């Protein structure tokens, strides 16, 4: 039978609908009769207690009921015995009953629904329950459970479920307050929520079939959730269910419904409902079949301009179905998870949901390594990638070649994405590319904008090779995604800025940094480093996007004409061929056919068989890669059996075989070093010989020991102590010792400055005599301690690192935001206590003092770069002055830096490999550029090794 839409589909199965009348067994109603139900409900003089009656009759107009009215224990009450008033008869005349109870209830009683649930456990209520089917229990209530009663309620419901397990609970919340029930914050104290959450906490959420809320402006009710218990052979969807054999029809109609109702609320409701649908469908499936079905249902959101991010929709379904999260009973809680996921890109990249958040559905493409690209079926991704101690799960393809194992990390080969996937791709690509380019002798921070340009250069190299157009499209998409990064403090992406014709200046406005990035690009793809940066830039734009090339030609045209006499149509190909760059080798790995019939289990390689053709299902395709025997095929035709993976019935077959195994073989030359060598799994950092290395006087301090001094820099409120405590934890977890010393932690205990300094001196002396192989001392001040002697203790032979916290570059925009953000942190501090990490605060000091100290510290460390951000001394006025800058800077930090990554990078930079056979201490090497000093570095290495550090965006080699 053909159906026009999903509503018509469900109407056809109207005998299988539930919760709309038709309940023949009397409903048990547990009515809230607490004191608060006497409050007015709306402007017409009604009260909440009577509104509960109206809602019940509106919901079940043709049903009969049994009633228990409840509130709290009151030994003086004649009617509410032990807090309940039972009417042990079946009735449909509800109005008079409610009037009698209302006239006799106590207006000061509290909310203890557990008293009613406990009563239902008693034998005298046995006849209230249906022995041949489910019994519905409806709970109208206007408030939340008394805090001291929650455990009693939980035990009562657990006992009731154990004693009478064929029950369905429905919550009807009726309250006088108007709310937006779609917002999680509004639901904190909303009526009925505590009851629902208690049931959920006890893992009994399957008992609740409905939870609706009503208020004077929401008289038709707001549904938080709706579900139905289904008979054998049927599949649920919200309060509907349908026969199992109609699932393919349901899926196609649901796909159409999602596309036609493209709004966030509709999509969130559908996800909430199909969680139970999928859980029911996968009950008897193998893990592989379950994964395919989950992929198929998540594909219904993969269409252009979908109102919900498809990657997040997939992750929400995956988490719920795999049981990593309990099912959310309250719609607002369920919807709030979407916002949580947007904030957890870093966490999602580290989880087993990494493929989903990166948008990898069917195909993945490897990053270009050693002139090799591999296109791979997503199901073949089985290798983890490890970078700086962070593990990325099953996001690489492992290739064995010439007895060498390589790991190739991948990005998505599927183009259609929402909002979170591009952000995740940018973060992951920065991490991966910072490792890949080390092979080319390029050592830069993953956050450096040079990574963005290097990806453009990589795309240019790919697009000038004879490769499939799908591969070129994927690399262009990757490059454009990297250019989708927003400029600091502007609602403008790098790509939109370039398309407006602006010069490709980095955020800090320094053109030299752009030229340096072009040099990195030429080095990475193997083009002569004598090429003019603007010529290379136009070639990269031309190969990426014709419109981008038109907008950027003005910056490069004269340079190109001077070198080539004209502007070539394919400048990139000319540059690549002129420097005789090796061609890219391309391999495609696909799932091999399963030559064992999945029905008869016979091997059909010698006889051949019938292969199920690839076919569409919803917004995706099903490609089973299965071959069935001829006998099974005849049975399929006779019985009109559908696809084993998606159950679509109108499928086609192709006769294939007999055939031999045909394995994909990839031969990788070992001429190219590869940081993804499986032996190291992203840990291998090649060392390159260097010339023109600064000569430094060195003295050997000790064998097998590291002694490291960190002097923190930053004004008050800049988050230094948070960084140091997490770094200390990391060092201690790896067997080292770490001391964090400054006067603040002693000042908060009431010691004067002189005594506090004495305590610091004592701890520093203790650190110096430690026998631990690795000792790190962190000076937690604002960075005003210079020289080798600190708090009276000499650190002349220690490695010294001066680290500016939470200020990556000294541009005016960043400095203004940094100062506003840190000052706001200080002004919002509470009064310190013995455990506080800070001393200065606006309560023990005054606002003027806080601003004065913040200003003096900032002037001392920023010197000529200091910017005054306010002249006011009233707290509210100051906070208003700095709000926009502080907010933008907070967003900048949240978007670009995670605490975990920062700590890992600091640890790798400062500690490195703890197994060095010899530590060489040097005099202090101060690295400056443009008179800006952001870090002082004392090199630590064996005498034959070379360290590379990036300071102020300049790559330095240090012997």
Image (cartoon, rainbow, N blue to C red):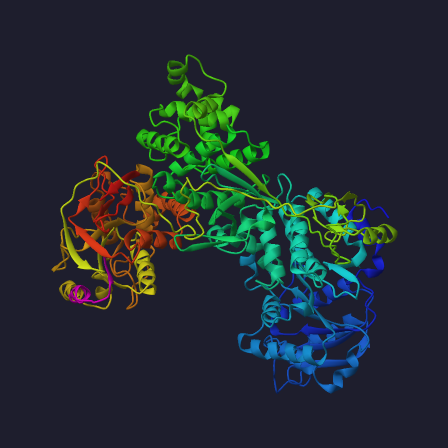
Q: Is residue 220 above or below residue 413?
A: below
Kindly identify the residue that appears in the image at 82 percent across and 49 percent down.
8
- Name the residue furthest top: 565
The picture quadrant where one finds residue 181 is: bottom right
Residue 609 vs residue 150, the one in the foreground: 609
Residue pushed farthest right? 638
Q: In this view of the protein, can residue 781 be seen by the observer?
A: no
The percent coordinates of residue 191 (x first, y second) are 61, 65
> Which segment is the magenta one?
762-778
The picture quadrant where one finds residue 770 is bottom left
Examine the structure image and report whether residue 491 is included in the region drawn in magenta: no
Whether residue 765 appears in magenta in the rendering, the answer is: yes
Q: Is residue 91 visible?
A: yes
Q: Residue at x 82, y 46 (%)?
A: 3
Q: Is residue 172 above or below residue 869?
A: below
Q: Indicate the position of residue 248 as horizontal and vertical percent values.
A: 77, 51
Q: What is the total number of numbered labels drawn onto the structure image?
A: 0
Identified at 34% across, 41% down, the residue is 444
Q: Tell whether 752 sits left or right of 440.
A: left
Where in the figure is residue 820, as x and y percent of width and height?
A: 32, 46
Using the rendered view, name the quadrant where residue 529 is placed: top left
Give the camera-side residue of 862 and 170.
862
Q: Is residue 225 above or below residue 581?
A: below
Q: State left or right for residue 6 relative to residue 341.
A: right
Percent of width and height locating residue 876: 34, 50
Who's the residue at 57% across and 46% down the image?
A: 360
């Amino acid at each position: 039978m053909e159906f026009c839409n999903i509503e018509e589909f469900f109407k056809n199965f109207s005998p299988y609908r539930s919760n709309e009348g038709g309940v023949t067994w009397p409903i048990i109603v547990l009515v809230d009769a607490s004191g608060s139900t006497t409050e007015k409900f709306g402007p017409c003089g009604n009260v909440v207690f009577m509104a509960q009656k109206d809602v019940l009759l509106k919901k079940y107009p043709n049903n009969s009921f049994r009633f228990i009215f409840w509130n709290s224990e009151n030994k003086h009450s004649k009617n509410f015995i032990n807090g309940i008033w039972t009417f042990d008869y079946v009735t449909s005349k509800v109005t008079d009953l409610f009037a009698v109870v209302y006239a006799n209830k106590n207006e000061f009683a509290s909310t203890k629904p557990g008293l009613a649930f406990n009563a239902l456990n008693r034998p005298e209520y046995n006849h209230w329950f249906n022995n041949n089917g489910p019994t519905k229990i409806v709970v109208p209530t206007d408030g939340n459970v008394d805090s001291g009663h929650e455990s009693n309620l939980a035990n009562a419901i657990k006992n009731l479920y154990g004693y009478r397990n064929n029950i369905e609970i429905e919550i009807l919340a009726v309250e006088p307050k108007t709310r937006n029930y779609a917002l999680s914050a509004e639901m904190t104290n909303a009526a009925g929520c505590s009851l629902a959450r208690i049931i959920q906490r006890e893992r009994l959420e399957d008992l609740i079939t409905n939870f609706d809320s009503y208020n004077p402006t929401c008289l038709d009710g707001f549904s938080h959730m709706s579900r139905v218990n289904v008979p054998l052979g049927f599949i649920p969807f919200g309060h509907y269910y349908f026969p199992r054999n109609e699932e393919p029809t349901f899926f196609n109609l649901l796909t159409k419904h999602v596309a036609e109702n493209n709004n966030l609320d509709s999509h969130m409701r559908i996800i909430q409902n199909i969680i139970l649908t999928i859980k029911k469908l996968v009950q008897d499936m193998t893990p592989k079949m379950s994964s395919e079905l989950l992929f198929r249902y998540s594909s219904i959101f993969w269409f252009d301009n979908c109102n919900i991010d498809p990657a997040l929709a997939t992750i929400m379904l995956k988490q719920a179905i795999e049981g990593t999260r309990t099912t959310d009973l309250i719609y607002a809680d369920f919807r709030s998870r979407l916002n949580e996921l947007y904030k957890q890109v870093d966490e999602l990249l580290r989880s087993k949901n990494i493929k989903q958040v990166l948008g990898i559905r069917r195909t993945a493409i490897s990053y270009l390594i050693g002139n090799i690209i591999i296109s791979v079926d997503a199901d073949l991704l089985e290798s983890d990638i490890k970078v700086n101690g962070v593990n990325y799960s099953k996001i690489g393809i492992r290739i064995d070649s010439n007895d060498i194992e390589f790991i190739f990390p991948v990005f998505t080969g599927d183009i259609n994405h929402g909002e979170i996937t591009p952000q995740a791709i940018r973060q992951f690509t920065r991490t991966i590319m910072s490792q890949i380019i080390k092979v080319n002798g390029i050592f830069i921070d993953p956050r450096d904008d040079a990574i963005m340009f290097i990806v453009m250069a990589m795309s240019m190299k790919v697009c000038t090779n004879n490769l499939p157009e799908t591969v070129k499209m994927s690399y262009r998409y990757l490059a454009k995604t990297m250019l989708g990064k927003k400029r600091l403090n502007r609602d403008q992406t790098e790509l939109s800025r370039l398309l407006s014709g602006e010069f490709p200046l980095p955020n800090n406005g320094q053109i030299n940094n752009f030229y340096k990035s072009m040099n990195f690009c030429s080095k990475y793809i193997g083009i002569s480093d004598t090429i003019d940066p603007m010529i290379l830039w136009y070639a990269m734009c031309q190969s990426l996007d014709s419109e981008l090339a038109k907008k950027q030609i003005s910056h490069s045209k004269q340079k190109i004409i001077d070198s080539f006499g004209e502007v070539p149509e394919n400048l990139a190909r000319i540059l690549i061929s002129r420097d005789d760059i090796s061609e890219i080798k391309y391999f495609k790995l696909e799932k091999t056919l399963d030559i064992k019939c999945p029905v008869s289990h016979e091997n059909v390689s010698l006889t051949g068989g019938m292969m199920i053709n690839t076919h569409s299902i919803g917004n995706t395709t099903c490609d089973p890669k299965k071959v069935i025997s001829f006998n099974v095929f005849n049975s399929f035709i006779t019985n009109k059996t559908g696809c084993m993976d998606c159950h679509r019935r109108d499928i086609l077959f192709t006769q294939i075989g007999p055939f031999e195994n045909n394995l994909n073989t990839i031969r990788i030359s070992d001429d190219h070093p590869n940081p993804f060598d499986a032996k190291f799994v992203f840990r291998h950092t090649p060392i390159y010989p260097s010339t023109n290395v600064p000569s430094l006087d060195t003295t050997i301090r000790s064998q097998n020991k590291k002694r490291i001094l960190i002097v923190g820099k930053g004004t008050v409120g800049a988050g230094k102590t948070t960084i140091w405590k997490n770094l200390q934890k990391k060092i201690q977890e790896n067997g080292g010792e770490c001391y964090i010393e400054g006067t603040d932690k002693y000042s908060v205990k009431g010691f004067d400055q002189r005594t506090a300094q004495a305590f610091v001196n004592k701890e520093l002396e203790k650190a110096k005599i430690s026998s631990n192989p690795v000792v790190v001392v962190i000076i937690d001040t604002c960075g005003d301690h210079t020289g080798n002697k600190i708090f009276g203790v000499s650190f002349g032979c220690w490695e010294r690192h001066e680290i500016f916290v939470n200020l990556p570059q000294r541009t005016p925009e960043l400095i203004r935001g940094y100062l506003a953000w840190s000052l706001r942190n200080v002004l919002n501090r509470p009064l310190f206590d013995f455990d506080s990490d800070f001393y200065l605060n606006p309560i023990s000091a005054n606002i003027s003092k806080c601003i004065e100290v913040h200003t003096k510290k900032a002037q001392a460390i920023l010197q000529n770069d200091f910017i005054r951000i306010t002249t006011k001394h009233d707290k509210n006025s100051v906070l208003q002055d700095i709000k926009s800058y502080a907010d933008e800077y907070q967003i900048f930090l949240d978007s670009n830096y995670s605490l975990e990554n920062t700590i890992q990078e600091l640890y790798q930079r400062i500690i490195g490999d703890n197994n060095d056979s010899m530590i060489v201490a040097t005099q202090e090497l101060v690295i400056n550029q443009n008179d800006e000093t952001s870090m002082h570095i004392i090199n630590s290495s064996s005498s034959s090794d070379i360290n590379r550090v990036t300071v102020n965006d300049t790559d330095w080699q240090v012997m």
